[in-house]
Amino acid sequence: MKTRIAVAVATALICASPGIIAGKAEAEKWINSEFQPSTLTKEQQMEEMAWFIKAAEPFRGMEINVLSETIPTHEYESKTLTKAFEEITGIKVNHQLLGEGEVVQAVQTQMQTGRNLYDAYINDSDLIGTHSRLQLAVNLTDWMAGEGRDVTNPMLDLDDFMGISFTTGPDGKVYQIPDQQFANLYWFRYDWFQRDDLKKKFKEIYGYDLGVPVNWSAYEDIAEFFSEHVKEIDGVRIYGHMDYGKRAPDLGWRMTDAWLSMAGEGSKGLPNGRPVDEWGIRMEEGSCNPVGASVSRGGGANSPAAVYAIRKWDEWLRKYAPPGAASYDFYQSLPALSQGNVAQQIFWYTAFTSSMVAPKSAGNNTVDDSGKPLWRMAPSPHGPYWEDGMKLGYQDAGSWTLFKSTPVDRRKAAWLFAQFAVSKTVSLKKTHVGLTPIRDSDIRHASFTERAPNLGGLVEFYRSPDRVRWTPTGVNVPDYPKLAQIWWQQIGDVNSGAFTPQEAMDRLAEEMDITMARMQVADEKAKVYGGCGPRLNEPRDPSYWLNQPGSPKAKLANEKPQGETIDYDELVKRWQKAG
């Protein structure tokens, strides 16, 4: 009975005014031909599309512009979802794709100038601390209840979004809606790790079992093992590690994307450490004012744990990665795994799952003849400074973001497209295309149970309780664009040999504090950051802070404890039982 009523309501909405019959026909066409599978029935999908058609009536014929970075999920949105949305609603969307750095620059420019460059952005939730302070982005909680109520999908279901906590500010308000998310996990050649001859040889050399590394000591041993002891498999020169080192903005995100937290630089706490987060920025519990990044101010950016993290990144890149890896950027390094000459990668983004399950005929040497992956993904290993209760890695949550500088009518039309792109009618199919799940209902759908054996652990990870330990940048970072640009230049000086890790991190921490000092002045004078800008601690002898409990942490006498591994199949059983 309820289903028949829903269909009747949907039909009534679609046929409510002249010229909308095409909307119904096109909605049915897309639902039948493209938007399957779905967690909704076709009747429920039609009900949702009926709402979009009705809500879009005032904006029919409008042309809007949105921007995102270039990954397969957004390519699908740009090529397919814009076409579907236009045919169903009559609103044309130009969805532009650029590199991540260019997206951040465009966001920063629109915030600084107030010019409406784009009507909506898919902007990483890493900027949550920025958006909640500057109040230049639309507070979506208030928008959905107020001015944007007439264009807010009643079937949106915020509680179904796995990353909604990432896009919620310290005021409890939602500022962004997740559109895609992916984690940096550990990647390894499962087929090689299963070989009896290699397992025997590894144990003879290192005294413990070859398996998924639990700590960085084991990762380093495995990197050395494949690079220096195995050297060649099936006539191919192989390596025990892959990474990138090109002096570009990607290199900074390589570190702010939780590399330091994996080593153990920050404090305990989820989604981010408090008082010290993975950027090394200190902000006391109960406060919204960052107090510093340098150890002398209570931060951790140049602490022993942070220096250790940078030293290991540089050392492993030089010793165990394929020639040329140091000149790769983010986009070059990750697909390079498909060549089939790397045993493991400690910092691998699940956004590249779709390309890593491409068929052998497409040049992917990490799948077998039937298309099943020869590799698996697993939790990231942690460094010696890491403690249980800390985050264990990064999770990108590219999220729809609206700005107050966008005219309201264009903002409303863009909000409709944003919701369409994450709607339950569309999201499961989009997740199968891009493999960047945002909804809990999608990843638990039967279609992913069926597909799981071909995705190398992606489904098991996202169904497990472990997923909460991978989180984006949090609220300690007061202005992401201004601070992020400092990182890559300092880190690049390590790779070039111009500075030691300690020198580079000392400079980085100092530059962060100088930049935050300027923010403090602006906030104190004009409340630029809503009174939640930095309020820097006075510098004092670093030993004071290093002798306090928690982060920043004093240098360990032994930064390479015994290596520890876990059997992958046992790990998956734990995930399945817990999830």
Image (cartoon, rainbow, N blue to C red):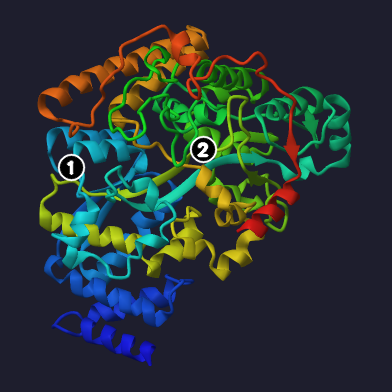
- Residue 335 sits above or below residue 496 on the image: below
* Nearest to the observer: residue 524 or residue 474: 524
- Residue 49 sits above or below residue 538 on the image: below
Q: In which quarter of the image is the C terminus?
A: bottom right
Q: Can residue 496 be seen in this view?
A: no
* Nearest to the observer: residue 431 or residue 361: 431
Q: Position of residue 573 (x, y in %)?
A: 71, 55
Task: Check residue 55 in the rendering and tell me which mark sits there, or answer none.
Answer: none
Name the residue that disc number 1 marks. Answer: 117
Q: Quadrant of the N terminus?
A: bottom left
Residue at point 35% right, 28% down? 283
* Left or right: 73 as drawn, with respect to 352: left
Residue at point 63% right, 52% down? 457
Q: What element carries label 1?
A: loop
Amino acid at dot 1: Leu
Q: Is residue 46 visible?
A: yes
Q: Which of marks 1 and 2 is nearer the N terminus?
A: 1
Amino acid at dot 2: Lys
Q: Position of residue 271 (x, y in %)?
A: 44, 41
Q: Where is residue 555 in the image (x, y as percent from the top left)?
A: 57, 14
* Left or right: 225 as drawn, with respect to 129: right
* Left or right: 543 as drawn, with respect to 108: right
Q: In which quarter of the image is residue 235?
A: top right
Name the residue that disc number 2 marks. Answer: 391
* Nearest to the observer: residue 17 or residue 515: 515
Q: Where is residue 145 in the image (x, y as percent from the top left)?
A: 19, 61
